[in-house]
Amino acid sequence: MIVSFDFDGTLSEKEVQSYAKYLLSKGITVMVHTNRPPSFCKDVFKFSYEVGISADNVRFCGDVGK
């Protein structure tokens, strides 16, 4: 099973981070999809690392095709 979270207003919230950690502890793959462009990745990777989400499971959708 794969579960994906948006970053801003979702994974950036402590309650959601706790839930993501719980899912990871159950062997569920957790991904992050954000509308941020890759140039604004620092916060996303910081939080993802703290939660335990692999950098390979982070997707940036902002500025795609520009």
Image: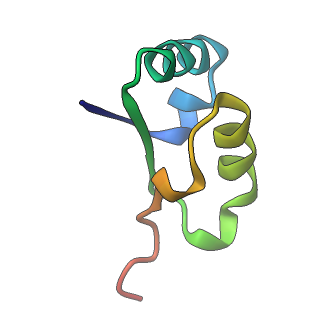
In the rendered view, tell whether residue 11 sits above or below residue 20.
Answer: below
Residue at screen point 59% across, 55% down: 55
22 relative to 18 in the view: left or right: left
Q: Position of residue 52 (x, y in %)?
A: 63, 33
Hey, which residue is sitting farthest bottom in the picture? Answer: 66
19 relative to 50 in the view: left or right: left
In the rendered view, tell whether residue 3 sits above or below residue 27.
Answer: below
Residue at screen point 45% across, 76% down: 63
Among the 4 quarters of the image, the one containing residue 59: bottom left
Q: Nearer the viewer, residue 26 or 38?
A: 26
Q: Nearer the viewer, residue 17 or 49?
A: 49
Q: Position of residue 43 (x, y in %)?
A: 73, 49
In the rendered view, tell whether residue 16 sits above or below residue 32.
Answer: above
Instruction: Please state, as top left, top right, bottom left or bottom right, where the C terminus lies in the image.
Output: bottom left
Hey, which residue is sitting farthest front in the picture? Answer: 27
Residue at screen point 41% across, 65% down: 61
Instruction: Please state, as top left, top right, bottom left or bottom right, where the N terminus lies in the image.
Output: top left
Residue at screen point 59% across, 13% down: 18
Q: Position of residue 32 (x, y in %)?
A: 46, 44
In the rendered view, tell whether residue 19 sits above or below residue 12.
Answer: above
Q: How is the image coloured?
A: rainbow
Give the tally of numbered discs: 0
Hey, which residue is sitting farthest left in the picture? Answer: 1
